[in-house]
Image: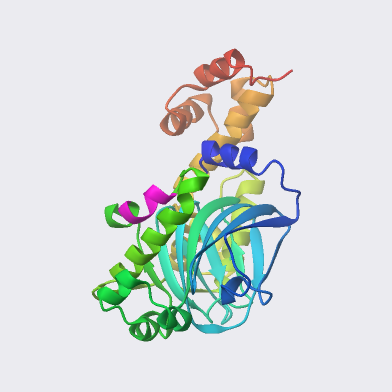
Amino acid sequence: MRQDERSCLEAALADVPLGTLQMERHGAQEGSSASLSHHFHASTEGKGRLEVYHVCPGVTAVFASYLADRAAFRHDALETVLEIDHCRTGRIGWNMRDGRAVYLGAGDLCLHSMACCCGSVMTFPTGYSTALSFTVDLARLGEDLPPALRAAGLDPRSLVERFCKAPPLAFPAGAALDCVFSPLYGLPEELRAPYLQLKAQELLLCLSRLQPGGREAAQYFSQQIERVREIHDLLTGHLDRRYTIEALSKRYLINTSSLKEVFKAVYGLPIATYMKEYRVHRAMELLRETDMIIADIAAQVGYESQGKFTNAFKDVAHMLPTEYRKQCRVSGAGPG
């Protein structure tokens, strides 16, 4: 729900037609990546851009930007190809081929084989996301191991056993992950390829030395996910109404603990916190784009008094509604 992130992404993807996942290849060689060869197909009703880099034999990196609710991917079940996904902004979920789903928030990392996600659907609960993924064909890498990895004694076969034959693993955002990935975002084009070569090797060395402690990615059944999405649509489609957890649980036949857990996994926040932010962001749109009086805006987004609305708005936006509207008018973002 970070409006500044979404606005920047809308500007970056302004030239991409709706219904298109634009793929740009940089330094790729024919057949250099099994995961992004003719066996790979992607589609969406939204739009996005995939910037594909051939890093070294067996290793591909993809900078991905999405303005969409979901995207569908089809590729072969590649059991020795490890996918390493880092979510930079927004939220990402995968509906895996076995009917389960896993979710990442900003800064989180997920490891899984490309056998897990063949024929999968990637979802974006916030409507947008940016991410960086490395796909590592460990069998191919072993045939032409870079000198630094050979000197370190890295054995790609051990990575297959540890990560490709295990359930998806997730690692939460933190300083260690940030040190690896943050230098890769925002690089000038001429530095991307050399940085990716260095960072891919660093990442593989880190994985080879990784001690047990990564957690198996939390997985949820697709039926739970769909019910939570229906609940989300009900809540966001009727901001003038209030629903209790108990009432939602009975209406959608999901127990209260599962409802709270799955909602937070999908949307990144507890229901009450998410809805407070959602109401305030909707109010911000109305303050920018209309001349409605603040009391009417408060009622439209579900607050019974202007005072309660003002307190909630200040908690989220760190300013009063009147100050926000004035700021928008001064900057030329107002109606008219």
**Residue 167 at x, y = what percent?**
42, 80
The residue nearer to you, when weighing 298 against 109, is 109
Which residue range is magenta in the image? 179-184
Image quadrant occupied by the C terminus = top right
**Quarter assignment of residue 303:** top right
The residue nearer to you, when weighing 96 against 282, is 96
Magenta residues, dominant SS class: helix
Q: Up-down: is 192 above or below 163?
A: above
Q: Is 8 within the magenta?
A: no
**Residue 98 at x, y = what percent?**
56, 82
At 59% from the left edge and 37% from the top edge, which residue is drawn? 7
Q: Is 157 placed left or right of 331 in the picture?
A: left
Residue 105 seen anywhere in this rendered image of the structure: no
**Residue 156 at x, y = what percent?**
37, 81
The residue nearer to you, when weighing 279 against 9, is 9
The residue nearer to you, when weighing 149 against 281, is 149
Q: Is 293 placed left or right of 319 in the picture?
A: right
At 38% from the left edge and 68% from the top edge, which residue is drawn? 170
Q: Is 182 within the magenta?
A: yes
